[in-house]
Image: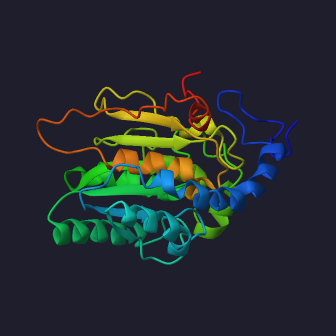
């Protein structure tokens, strides 16, 4: 039995990843190291239209961890912003209100809608902001975010409770986390995630929003925000044109041999 599975694990929800997958989190530095050789290819991602993008960090992380992704997106012509609230210690008092004010300010400054990108817990903020302020949000992209699983289907739930001072069981009483935001929504996930049970990152089809999708990459949880495959997917999704006559298109996996391995079929 994997190290982090309890004996009373409810079969109705997936258990958190076991020790072998957790050990694979050590590959995260190599994922970031792959950015340099992949840079020429990454620069072939669609150029953006200059709209603003707010990037939210994961649990106990800060804006420094999202600098590499933000610098890449800036190279693709996006105006990026960190979340500006120091370390992400959970939705403590004032955190979500500050995020709302930042979203409003970014929209006012740019004169348009803002895209929201969130890594792990940061993706929860992105999704919930889009639900509360959909008129200001262009799209939502999450990276390894546990929005659909049981609150204990991750190896970080105890850290969450310690850092935030909040009971993780109570969070689902206030938020319908699995519900898709009413804007184009992409979940980027990895089956080899060592922290979050990958099924907890799968966005189910939503009757109120046909513009949702799941993109699978080969990445660790700690490295998914530094992974060149994930970066390409983020840039590709942000690069979709907007307008009343534009039809949203789902992500297209590369058809070239070898490149398909970077984006496994999420429906397999």
Please determine whether, in this image, residue 88 is positioned above or below residue 215.
below
Residue 131 point in image, percent of width and height: 31, 48
Q: Is residue 179 left or right of residue 105?
A: right
Residue 32 at x, y percent in the picture: 63, 61
> Residue 36's image quarter?
bottom right
Q: Position of residue 139 (x, y in %)?
A: 31, 48
Q: Which quadrant of the view contains residue 259?
A: top right
Q: Residue at x 61, y 46 (%)?
A: 151
Residue extending farthest top = 268
* Total number of numbered discs in the rendering: 0
Query: Residue, x 54% and y 73% (percent of image)?
Result: 62
* Up/down of 266 relative to 63, above or below: above
Q: Position of residue 98 (x, y in %)?
A: 35, 72
Tell me the quarter of the image containing the C terminus. Answer: top right
- Horizontally, residue 157 falls left or right of residue 7, namely left
Q: Residue at x 79, y 36 (%)?
A: 8
- Can the viewer see residue 144 in this picture? no
């Amino acid at each position: 039995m994997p190290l982090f599975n309890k004996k009373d694990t409810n079969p109705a929800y997936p258990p958190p990843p076991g020790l072998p997958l957790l050990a694979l989190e050590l590959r995260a530095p190599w994922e970031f190291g792959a950015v340099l050789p992949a840079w020429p290819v990454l620069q072939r991602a669609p150029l953006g239209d200059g709209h603003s993008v707010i990037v939210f960090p994961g649990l106990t992380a800060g804006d420094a961890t999202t600098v590499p992704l933000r610098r890449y997106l800036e190279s693709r012509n996006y105006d990026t912003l960190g979340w500006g609230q120091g370390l992400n210690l959970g939705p403590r008092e004032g955190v979500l209100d500050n995020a709302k004010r930042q979203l409003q300010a970014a929209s006012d400054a740019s004169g348009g809608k803002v895209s929201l990108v969130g890594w792990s817990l940061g993706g929860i903020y992105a999704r919930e902001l889009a639900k509360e302020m959909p008129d200001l949000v262009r799209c939502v992209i999450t990276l390894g975010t546990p929005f659909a699983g049981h609150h204990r289907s991750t190896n970080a739930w105890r850290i969450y409770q310690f850092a935030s001072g909040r009971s993780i069981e109570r969070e689902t009483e206030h938020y319908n986390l699995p519900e898709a935001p009413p804007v184009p929504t992409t979940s980027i996930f990895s089956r080899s995630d060592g922290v979050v049970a990958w099924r907890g990152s799968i966005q189910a089809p939503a009757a109120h929003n046909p513009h949702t999708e799941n993109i699978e990459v080969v990445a660790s949880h700690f490295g998914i925000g530094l992974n060149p495959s994930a970066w390409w997917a983020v840039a590709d999704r942000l690069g979709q044109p907007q307008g009343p006559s534009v039809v949203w298109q789902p992500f297209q996996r590369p058809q070239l041999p070898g490149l398909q391995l970077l984006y496994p079929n999420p429906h397999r």
